[in-house]
Image (spheres, grey):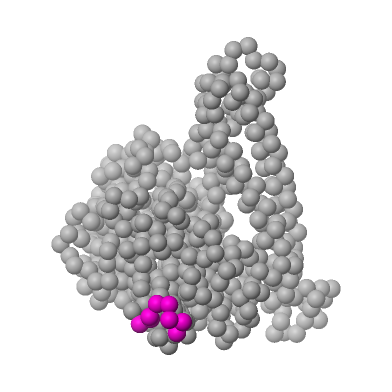
Amino acid sequence: MNYLINNMKIQTTKSFLLAATAAAFLTACDTPSALVTVPVENVDSNPLKVAALTDAQEKAWSYADLKADTIPGMSVNRTYEEIIPNKTGQQVIVAVIDSGIDIEHEDLKNKIWTNPNEIPGNGKDDDKNGYVDDIHGWNFLGDVNAEQLEFVRIIKRYESQFEGKTLASIPANQREIFQQYQKAKSEYDTKVTEAQANKTRYEQILGQLKTSHAAVKAKLGKEDYTAADLKAIANPTAEMQQHVAFLTQMLSYADSIPEFIKNINEGVDYFTNQLEANYNKTADFRKVLGDDPYDITDTNYGNNNVYGPEPDGAKHGTHVAGIIAAERDNGKGMNGVANKNIKIMALRAVPDGDEYDKDIALAIRYAVDNGAKVINTSFGKYYSQNPEWVYDAIKYAAKKDVLIVNAAGNEGISLDDPANRVYPNDQIDNVNEMSDTFLTVGALNLKYGGELVASFSNYGKSQVDVFAPGVRIYSTTPEDTYEFLQGTSMASPNTAGVAAMLRSYYPKLSAANIKKIIMASGLATGTQVILGGDETKKARFSDISKSGEMVNMYNAFKLAELQK
């Protein structure tokens, strides 16, 4: 499932507009002995921003430089100003395995990879790679958009076989999936109950919002009013006092009531979709594809429409692609991390639900075989029926010198706990890596100090490698639009953009070396940070990822320069 966070589910929009307020001492992290070290500027005494970010700063905060801007970005702009003008890079393809991409977006259309060995529209597999007319990538989902979560599919697939059975009665080669089935059944009841309760709660709030908003709108003669406007209503009736009290409280969660109504409507839609699609045990969304999702050799399915069947379904993938490579300095929307050297290969494999292992494994192999040097995977799930297919694909990417940049997930939990195993990953035993070209990224907030880590971000000294900006990230969305979205889904492409630029300007460095450089060149802080949004749960930032660092493009370039 896409690692994207709905603002209503995590924090209020208003809270993200606050600037950094607490002190943090940032120093260089120790680098692996295999790398030549590069000194990181001493910013211990750097003044910290206490004023709110301007609109321009907020839309590009992830590219800011800590010392110059007092904003905890990745020093992207500084890299372009001080290093890149003196260098010439080469083309690098970044594969985005996601929900679909609007390849005609005004800020992306010039950055989309085109298969040089395929003739458009002739209905033939010109390059003999198994995919007909794959001009810009491949859509492994066809017209499928909605999908169940993996644990629901497990229940659906094995209910008739396992119901009423005990572990002792199950053959040894089926006991692992039987245990997953038992866990899935327990989780299903809890999740459905929660979704139903949340839907009801949001519908009740929405109903009261509409009633109170209509009354106040009629009273004030305008739709956009402030808390001060509400307070100024003269001689309110008892009923109007109730409307004013309710709406005043709601305005603490959004800048306007129409905006808040929109957010609540999205919440109702979210929980409705969970019940009708994600938790639906009877639907067969996959049937229209005509393949067997549990047969990795059955590969004749999908189509070349990398956008997908509807714009909303492609929002996540379009946003991710824009973070990596939206055209820079064209006067439109925003700038991606990567410049004109970087092309995006579009691979649609992530539905509105959990992805199938088969689709992900084949998408990774497609990317590798068709020239991608970096792959972004902003998705994940906590159950897997065929993880070995994805493991083999990860190993294949490593063998072919391809870096995979992966989102850590948005549940605010420690991935070092074996009970919190997430897929995809590169550690079968939660300790030893099967690949040295798989980089997992957690999400940073805009704030220093205790709130530096995004409240939703997963973490782990063994399982998470680095952290990068992932809160309130402004990027491309379908139909030439732009939005703020957040999640580790946004932290991963920020890092993938840095990785792609390193591969472009230092082509002799291997994928494994690029991973090491990113992990060794960031900024670190020993401050205590809040984990999972729980103020009673804290740890030193240096102890919640393998590197203990925040990705920094400027320092990564400096370190790469010493390795070439």
Tell me if I can see residue 420 in this picture. no
Please give the name of the residue rendered at 24% of the width and 56% of the height, measured from the top-left corner: 79
The N terminus: image quadrant: bottom right
Along the line of sight, the residue nearer the viewer: 280 or 76: 280
Is residue 123 within the magenta segment?
A: yes
Q: Which residues are magenta?
A: 117-124
Q: Position of residue 311 (x, y in %)?
A: 51, 58
Classify residue 521 as left or right of residue 16. Answer: left
Q: Position of residue 240 (x, y in %)?
A: 66, 20
- Foreground residue among 562 and 272: 272
Residue 25 lies in the magenta stretch: no
Tell me: residue 270, above or below residue 561: above
Q: Compare residues 355 and 443 and report the one nearer the observer.
A: 355
Dominant SS type (magenta): loop
Image coords of residue 373 (percent x, y): 35, 74
Seen from this angle, which residue lies furthest top?
235
Tell me which residue sits at (52%, 21%) in the image: 228
* Residue 334 seen: yes
For residue 78, side relative to residue 138 (left or right): left
Look at the picture and state if 455 lies above or below 517. Answer: above
Residue drawn 62% across the image and 80% down it: 291
Farthest residue to the front: give it. 122
The residue lying toward the viewer, choosing from 296 and 431, is: 296
Residue shown at 17% from the left, 65% from the top = 87
Quarter holding the C terminus?
bottom left
In this view, the residue farthest toward the left is 86
Quadrant of the rendered structure where residue 95 is? bottom left
Picture layout, residue 52 above or below residue 67 = above
Q: Position of residue 517 (x, y in %)?
A: 31, 67
